[in-house]
Image (cartoon, rainbow, N blue to C red):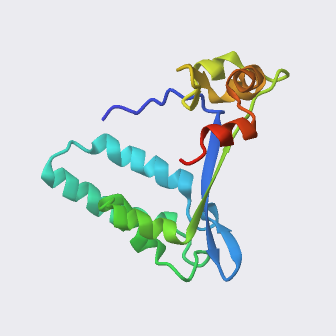
Amino acid sequence: MPQVKFTMHPHCGAGTYIYMEDGKYIPITRFIDVEGLFEYLSEVAEKYDHTTINKLQVTASIISHLTQFIDAKKAPRSVDVKKLLINALTKGTEDVIKQFHRKTLFLGIMHFQDLYNIDLNRVERCGIHYATPDGRVIPFCSYNTLHREIVERRFSVPLGEWERSHAGH
């Protein structure tokens, strides 16, 4: 199976999940070897040929190897991490994904650029954009530094004027 090639620059952002249990945050990386799990899933994906029998073999392989990536002693007590991951990886239904997110918080970060560290290669490969009222699409990482003031000057409306124009709506 061909490797997915993302267009975004690898330094644009990062994300992780944390669990909340007994008022404490537990980073997912504390009890799951995320890097190892993704490396393993990548290896398995290369062997997947989309036949029914192969799908069953791949699923069985994932289930049998999953525990090597989970440290049950450090995992939250309130959730069966292995079962949750198996369901997410094999079923992938909306209900399963909701169950995963019920006790987690996704933390995502993006690196803003300014005039001192702007990287044009990153701007060219930006995958998140702002759309302006005039139809332009502006890369997220260059918006604050290069475009925000111009866009705000051109399209902002004083609050009182906006309230008058939207009265009764």
Question: 165 left or right of 135?
Answer: right
Image point (32%, 61%), residue name: 93
Q: Residue at x 41, y 33 (%)?
A: 4
- In-front residue for pair 35/157: 157
Direction from residue 156 to residue 63 in the image, left or right: left
In this view, the residue in front, 164 or 81, is 164
Residue at (50%, 65%) from the top-left corner?
Answer: 101
Q: Residue at x 73, y 27 (%)?
A: 152
Residue closest to the eye, 55 or 169 = 169
Point out residue 76 in the picture as x, y percentages from the top left corner.
58, 77
- Asked which quadrant contains residue 46, the reply is top left
| Res 23 → quadrant | bottom right
- From this viewpoint, which residue is outermost toward the right? 116
Quadrant holding the N terminus: top left
Q: Is residue 119 shown left or right of residue 51?
A: right
In the image, residue 112 sits, relative to residue 74, either above or below, namely above
Up the image or down, 157 lies above or below 94; here it is above
Image location of residue 132, percent across then percent down:
59, 25
Residue 147 vs 42, above or below: the answer is above
Instruction: Indicate the position of residue 123 as horizontal and vertical percent values.
Output: 64, 21
